[in-house]
Every structure is written in C-alpha cells, then in structure tokens.
Amino acid sequence: MSIALTEIRRSPLRFGLLTAAVGLLLALVLFLATVGGALLSRITGALERQSAPVLVFAVEARRNVQASLIAPGVAERVAAVPGVAAVAPWVTRGFTLRTGAGLRDGTLIGYEPGGPGAPTDIVEGRLPRMNGEAVLSALDAEAGFEVGSTVRVLPGGSPLEIVGLAEGASFAVQPTLFTPYEGFTAIARRAFPDAGPVLPSVLAVAPAPGEDPVALARRITEAVPGVEALDRQTAVASVPGTDAIRSSLGLLLGLAFVVVVVVIGFFFLIFAVQKADVFTLLLAMGTPARSLVGGLALQVVLVVGVGSLLATGLLAALATTGDRAFPISVDPGLALGTGATAVALSLLAALGAVRRIVRIDPAAAVRGGGGELA
Amino acid sequence: MRPARIGATEVLRRPGRFAITAAVLALLVALQVVLWGLLDGLTGSTTGAYRALGADLLVYGPASRAALLRSQVSPELRARVEAADGVAAVGGLGVTLTWGRTDGAPVPTDLAVFGYERSTGRLPAPPPPGDGLADRSLSQEGVAIGDVLAVGPQGVPIRVSGWVQDASYLGQPGLWVAPATWRRVLATAAPDRVLPEGTWQALVVDAEGDAAAVAARIARATGAEALPLDEAISRLPGVEAQRASFLQLIGATTLVAGLVVALFFALITLERVRLFGVLKAVGVSSAQLLGALALQALTVTGAAYAVGVAAAVALARVAPEEVPIRLTGGRVLWVAPVLVGTALLGLATSLRRVVRIDPATAVVGR
C-alpha cells in the first residue's frame, strides 16, 4: 500500500492530470444531474407541491395543464363519482408582473381556498385569505418581490399582495403566484376585457379518506366522458417537455459515465503495462499479487475520490456564480451517490489492469520481458 | 528514417497503444456532437416559427416582456407603429397553443395555430379562411395535404393546404392560418384570451435601414416593445437558459478532451525519454521530435473524430423519439477544429519535457 501512495506522491503530474480529468468529468455528470433536477423541479413544482392527490384534465389536452380546459358541468359529474370528497377548479395562465424589482414574467395559479389544490409547503407568511392576496414560489422572492410587497398583474394592472412563500412551487420555470380562484378570474377579465369566461385548466380532487388516488383517478376517467384523471405523481411526470428533458439527461449522463469509466480503466491499464517490469520484480521477491492489486485499487479509489471532491467543489463554485436562468445548489446526497457510483464503476473498469498484474509470471524477472499493451 | 515517419510507423505498428486515447477522445467527440445536436434540436423546435417569419422586427404590446401569449397590440398602437420612421410594412401576428386531430387519428397532436396577415420570409401569403399551412413535421404524424384537422376543444375544421418547413413554436408544430380562422380557434381554445377585432398579439415589421435603430425608434415613439428578430428569438421562453447551460457543458467536455490528450502524451513522453535521447544523440532536433508527436496527436484525434461522429450519428438514430437530437453538417464540422486545437494544446504540456531531454540520456540513462 505504501508503494502505491509513494508512487502517487512522486508522480504528481501523472496522477494530478488523471485526477483533474476525472474531476472535470464527474463535475460534468454532477452539473448535468443538478441542472436537470432543478429544471424539472421548476417546470413541475407547482403541480407537485399542491394539495390535490388527483387532477382531472380535458382528455384532448393530453395531460397538458396549459392546454386543458374543463367545460362547464364537468366538475359536478366528477363530484358525483364515488370516492370523491371534494372538487375545486384550478387554473393557470402566464402574465407579466410589475414588482418592486422591475417587470417579471410570471405564472398565476387560481385555486379554491380551503379546497384541494392549495400550495402545501408554506415556508414564510400564510396562505391567502381573500381575493387580491397571493403566495409566491419561494425561490423567486427578492427585494421588492417578497412577503408584504404588492405586485401589479399586466395587462390590466390588478394588484396582488404577497402574503406567503411556498417552497418549490414554481411552474413553467417562472415566478409563480397562487391566488384565490375568484380573484384570478377578476384579474383575467381585467387583462382581457373582451374575452369569454375563464374556464378551469384542470379540476383538483380530494379523495375520500382511505381512497387510493390511482384507483380513484381510473374511476373518474371511466365515469366522466371527455376527461382524463391522473394521480399527482403521474400528472407531474406527464408535464409536456419533461420526458424529453429526462431522456436527454439520461443519455448525456450515461455517455459521461462511460467516458469516466473508460478514462479510468484505460489509464490504469497503461500504468500497469508501464510498470510490468517492476511488478514482475516485486512478485519474484515474494510480494503477493493481492498486495499489488490492493495498491492499484487504492490508487483508483484515491483518484476517483479526490476527483469527486474536486467535482463537488467545482459545482459549488458554479452554484455561486448565479448567472443562470435558475439557481442550482450542491445536493450532498447526489454528490455522494455519484462519487460512490464512479468509484464502483472505476474499480470494475480497473479489472483489465488487475488481470494484467495477476497474469505476470515472476519467473520473467530472470529471463526478462516487459509489458506491452497490444 | 525521418522522425515524422517514425511517429507514423509507430501509430501503424502499435495501434493498441493509441487506441486507448482515441477511444476516450471518440467518446468525448460523441458527447460534444450529441450536446450540439440536442441544443440545436431543442432550440430549433422552439424557434422555427420566428425564423420562418424572417422579418426584420417583431413589435409586442407594452409591458408584455416579448411574450406573444400575453401581448396585445391595439389598432391605435398599430397605427402609431406604422407611422414610425423606417417602418416599411406591418402585419398582424397571433398564436394559440392547442391541439388538432385528423379524422380517425387515435390521438390528437399538439399545435401552435398562428394567424398572420402577410407573406414574409419562408411564409407565403395567408391561405383562404378554413385552410392552413402546416409545419412539415406533421407529415411524420400521418397528416397529409388535403386532410382536415379538427382544432381545439370545439374541433374548428382546418384543411391542410400546404407545408412550411421548420416552423414549430415552443416545441409544437405550427399551423399557419388566415386571421379569421385564427380568431375562431382563439375563441374556443383560449376563451379568456380573446382579443377584440383588429387587435393582435404582435406585429411583424419590415424595416428600412438598420433594424435595431428602427426598433429603438418604434419603442420611443409608441411605448411598445420592438425587437430585432434575433433578439425576439433569444427572448423566447427557455432559449437563452438552454443555450447558456449547453455551452457550459460543451466547454467542460472540450476542457476534458484537452486534459485527456495532455495526460496521454505526457505519459508517452515519460515512457520514451531514453528513445528520444538516442534520437537527439544522432542529430534529431527537439522541433522534429515535437513534429512527430504532433503528427501522432493529429492522427489519433482524426481517428477519434471520425469514430466519435459515427457514434453520435448512430446514437441519434437509436435515441428515443422524445430526445430531440438534430445533427447538422456545420456543427459536426465545427467540432473538428476545436478538437484539433484542444489536442495540440494538450500536447503542448509535453513541449518542455521534450526540449529538456539531454542526448546523454542515451548513454547514461535518466
């Protein structure tokens, strides 16, 4: 083991470059996973962190909240399905917000106070009690756009006072405000005076106690023509565009991991080949093969471990720059998991080098012969 | 034998030694090409409609933050825009995000229904009311010329009368229709966003002279948001964020590729110090040795580039349908000089070591 550590100490360039390469690759993996997670959460957070376990869509909208319109009369039919405890309208539209911090793009969500569909994770302030009040997605709060401030919804200029902050409640990667449904319709009418009625995007449903949301969603879909009911988890997973993001990220993460493994595997194989003469001599002098393999494994673990720390540090540095459209933060669980996976895969990748070591014939020390790669 | 030839012969006779680096570089090339492909795919399906417009400027209602769906341009505002200096022609534009279904289709398809008033860019003049020009991507979903799409919750019938290439919006295929048809769709698919007759979401403007200067004049004179087309495209939701994130990823991949080459040639140089000493002892210069190494680096990089591009193309073919990879020749070619430059930079890390090799090494060892 001490030989392995001494070698690292005496070959700083060789191991430094390898560690840097692994660190950068793992930083790429972490960055991809973190950005992807943050992006998905900002696209779907408002659906994920609202209180209704079941959401009912117009079937033609294909699970797209922003395309869905619930026709008049549907809510009553959904309420009549056995197992439904409460039904409330839930609507979302994009507006411009004039805040104390300037103009902002914003998503406004109308929900029924006291009914299903309210934001769940209030981290500051309270839920709205009347029209003209709203809860803001916590991540978007800033000076002039925080609890206690009043924003104007454009067009129309309707005022909304922010009375609370909800954790992770963003929708469509925009600042998101939850406000009472009735107030929402007034805001929409003021913004588009010539428009028709404001129809709910979806219906938020609370199941009766003990009712399974998945089973209830299936029953609603079967019982009410023209709608598709989904449990919350399925609704979140079905938000348009998230599939493409998940699949693309999966592809990129897979490729990046393959590169990490190939880099580690091939370079330790090179090292093993270069040191074949030394290994032969050590084996001839009685050093057990498992000791050499242990030293190699230690080097792999150290290179990937330090590379993981480097990657986490790089991500933390990136997280502080704050020049992206949405902030990211280091998730210790993700960093640890990525590092552990990389170590495990790298040890597997080093099997080629291990095989090369265990196949060395100590007798070659006296008759000569070095390592060759191919 | 000249050093360059020795270098080439070594690559030919011991490909295994170089295959390692070539394989790693090929994977990094594949990653880069796929990243560019994803960026182009995501951006293309978001911005196609605006690029199809090909106009000089887009003008949005005040305080709309360049968002079509919440912008309103009244007839009065339009008149002021038309009167602004440098404005050559103006047409109304509006969009409704909805869905449509041909008779017998099992599932509807998402649509961005655009109403427009005049021909610009790749768009011909608006079709007659009831007809629509569809984004060609709809043909992959079984839609054909002459098919009638039932659009929106009330199934407004629109007959597909032609195709427009690359004209989707926010990931939804565009369907370009006459103003009256669009207003029918708007009234049923977004009843709470109906606009009065004559009011549009935006104006498509042809400018005389510098588009940015005309945009600034329009904004000053009318209070509307006027943007040159490129800026309007970059203000579409998610475009800038996507671009910035992907460029960071591509930059990181390029950096790693450089490090891999640096690491590999540092190792090769270390391994061959004595051989280089012999070559120097018989009169080969450091420049010649570096030339031979550069030749090897370029050979490895070239092979890696070819394999990496082939891998990326294969990956794009087998990728799931929802992964929007769009590979273009320009992007694929662009990766080559970046990769070669990175490889040569990586090789430069061995420069000092090669120059400092003492020919006496050949006799007395290191």
Image (cartoon, grey):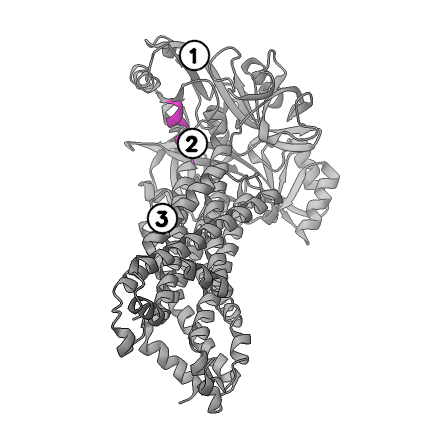
For the question of whether residue B155 can be seen, the reply is no
Residue B76 position (above or below residue A86): below
User: Looking at the picture, which amino acid does disc 2 mark?
Assistant: Val
Residue A299, x across and y down, in percent: 41, 57
> Considering the image in quadrants, where does the N terminus of chain B appear?
bottom left
- Callout 1: chain: A
Image quadrant where residue A85 sits: top left
Q: Which residue is mark 1?
A: A87
Q: Image check: A158 left or right of B277?
A: right
Q: Which residue is mark 2?
A: A239
Residue A84 position (above or below residue B244): above
- Callout 3: chain: A
Residue B61's tag is none
Residue A153 position (above or below residue B362): above
Residue A259 position (above or below residue A278): above
Question: Which residue occupies the foreground of this view, B115 or B301?
Answer: B301
- The tag earlier along the polypeptide, 3 or 2, is 2
Task: Say what secondary structure mark 3 lies in.
Answer: helix
- The tag earlier along the polypeptide, 1 or 2, is 1
Q: Image check: B165 left or right of A167?
A: left
Image quadrant where residue B195 sits: top right
Asked if labels 1 and 2 share a chain, the reply is yes
